[in-house]
Amino acid sequence: EVQLVESGGGLVQAGGSLRLSCAASGFTFDDYAIGWFRQAPGKERSGISCISSSDGSTYYADSVKGRFTISSDDAKNTVYLQMNNLKPEDTAVYYCAVSPSFSSRIRVAGALLRALYDFWGQGTQVTVSS
């Protein structure tokens, strides 16, 4: 069974930093991506970043480019999201997710579309105070 466990997050002042972790287990896909999504109260869940297993390519939503960095540690089966210069509008529940057959699927769809991701973690709260 695919399992994704997020950790990190919490309360931080605007301008501060947090690092989220996503520990993945229970799958042996040859081609996949792990993405980060977020959902603020009353708003839709949207993709913010992902990393591909095939070539290590990374993707970022415009709202976080230059501030967030996604990385992976294959030995630990863990993906990280380093979040710097946090803003109040970054406040949301953050989820990690797995997209099987990612490299082929994104040829006809955007890398951060929710429909590409089949397995989801439980989410972790990030709150940025002004």
Image: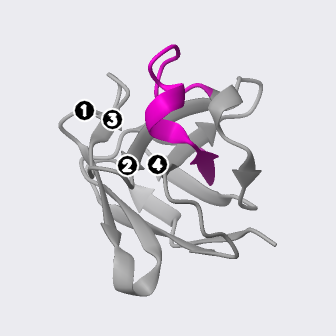
* Location of mark 2 (residue): 51
Quadrant of the rendered image containing residue 121? bottom right
Residue drawn at (70%, 27%), measured in percent from left and top? 115
Q: Secondary structure at mark 1?
A: loop
- Residue 101 colored magenta? yes
Q: Decide: is 28 above or below 113.
A: below
- Give, as a three-letter code, the residue at label 2: Ile
Kindly indicate the quadrant of the structure image that contains residue 74. bottom left
How far apart are the two marked residues, 2 and 4, measured between alpha carbons? Answer: 28 Å
- Residue 59's label in the rendered image is 3
Q: Which mark is residue 129?
A: 4
Q: Residue at x 71, y 23 (%)?
A: 43
Q: Is residue 95 visible?
A: no
Question: Are the residues tagged 3 and 2 within 8 Å (C-beta)?
Answer: yes
Query: Relative to residue 125, is residue 58 depicted above or below?
Result: above
User: According to the image, label 1 marks what residue?
Assistant: 65
Q: How many C-alpha atoms fall within 10 Å of the one at disc 3: few (<14), some, or many (≥20)?
A: some
Start-end of magenta stretch: 92-113
Mark positioned earlier in the residue sequence (1 or 2)? 2
Q: Is residue 78 left or right of residue 119?
A: left
Q: Are marks 3 and 1 in contact (CB under 8 Å)?
A: no
- Inspect the image, locate mark 1, and give the three-letter code of the amino acid beneath it: Lys
